Structures are given as structure tokens and as C-alpha cells.
Image: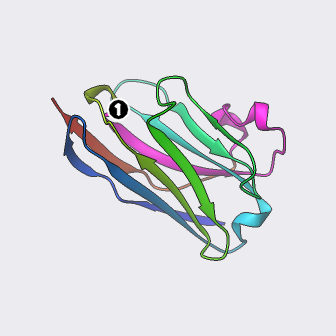
Amino acid sequence: VQLQASGGGLVQAGGSLRLSCTASGRTFSSYNMGWFRQAPGKQRDFVAAITRNGGTTDYADSVKGRFTISIDIAKNTLSLQMNGLKPEDTAVYYCGATAWSNIATLKNRKIYAYWGQGTQVTVSS
């Protein structure tokens, strides 16, 4: 599956952005999906994940209550609604797809077989 992330940009602290990730090839119904982010000089960290049927979600503590992950299987689109953005949210955001089924493992970037190219999110103070 090929993933394409979009929707990043420059926003002031407290603002909102909506990231999208579209897929070609096999559909999202075959994979569990996640969002990760990577700031300069740091590793790629877990942000949010969602199971293939959209029934279960998980979030990093740092984004709980501010970010919402969702999936539209009919449109083969994964989304991340980001509200209340903070300067520390600045990073390149990547969407990923994995065939692993255990929601508890979806925080681990190593289980993701497919990645989008990343989209830059910059939050100014």
C-alpha cells in the first residue's frame, strides 16, 4: 500500500490543523493505522492509532484531549484532527500502516510496514 500524507502547515499556538493520509493499493480495511511525529534530532514518536474498523483508538498522553484520529474506509482516508496546538507539537508527521492486530502494540513504530512521506507541522508561539 502507498500512503500520502497532507495537511501540514504553519499555525499559531492554540490553532488547529487537520492532517489526512490517503492510500492506494490495498484498502485501509486490511490494516491498523497510526500517526507518528519526528522533531529534528529526535526519534519518531507515537501520536495516535486506530484499528482497521475504526472501533478502537489510542493516543499518546501528550495529545489526549486535543487530537482525534479517525478513518473513512469508503474514502480510504485516515485523518488526524489537531486542536489546541502547542509549539512542542512542531514536527514532521507520518502516517503508517501495519498488519499487526494488537492495539497495545500500535505505539511501536517498528511494527509499521508502510509509511507516508511526512507532512511538516509548525506551531509558532
Residue 37 sits in quarter: top left
Q: Is residue 32 left or right of residue 59?
A: right
Residue indicated by mark 1: 89
Q: Is residue 105 left or right of residue 3?
A: right
Visual colour scheme: rainbow
Q: Nearer the viewer, residue 86 or 112?
A: 86
Toward the right, the furthest residue is 101
Label 1 amino acid?
Answer: Asp
Residue 25 sits in quarter: bottom right
- Residue under the point 32% across and 36% down: 84
**Percent coordinates x, y for residue 79 in the rendering:** 51, 57
Instruction: Tell me if residue 121 comes above or below residue 59 in the rendering.
Output: below
Instruction: Tell me if residue 41 comes above or below residue 121 in the rendering.
Output: above
**Percent coordinates x, y for residue 3 in the rendering:** 55, 63
Q: Is residue 59 left or right of residue 90?
A: right
- Residue under the point 25% across and 29% down: 87
Q: Is residue 105 magenta?
A: yes
- Residue under the point 64% across and 42% down: 49
The magenta segment is 90-112
**Percent coordinates x, y for residue 89 in the rendering:** 34, 32
Quadrant of image for the C terminus? top left
Q: In terms of secondary structure, where does tag 1 sit?
A: helix
Q: Nearer the viewer, residue 67 or 124?
A: 67
Q: Is residue 14 left or right of residue 106?
A: left
Q: Nearer the viewer, residue 37 or 66?
A: 66
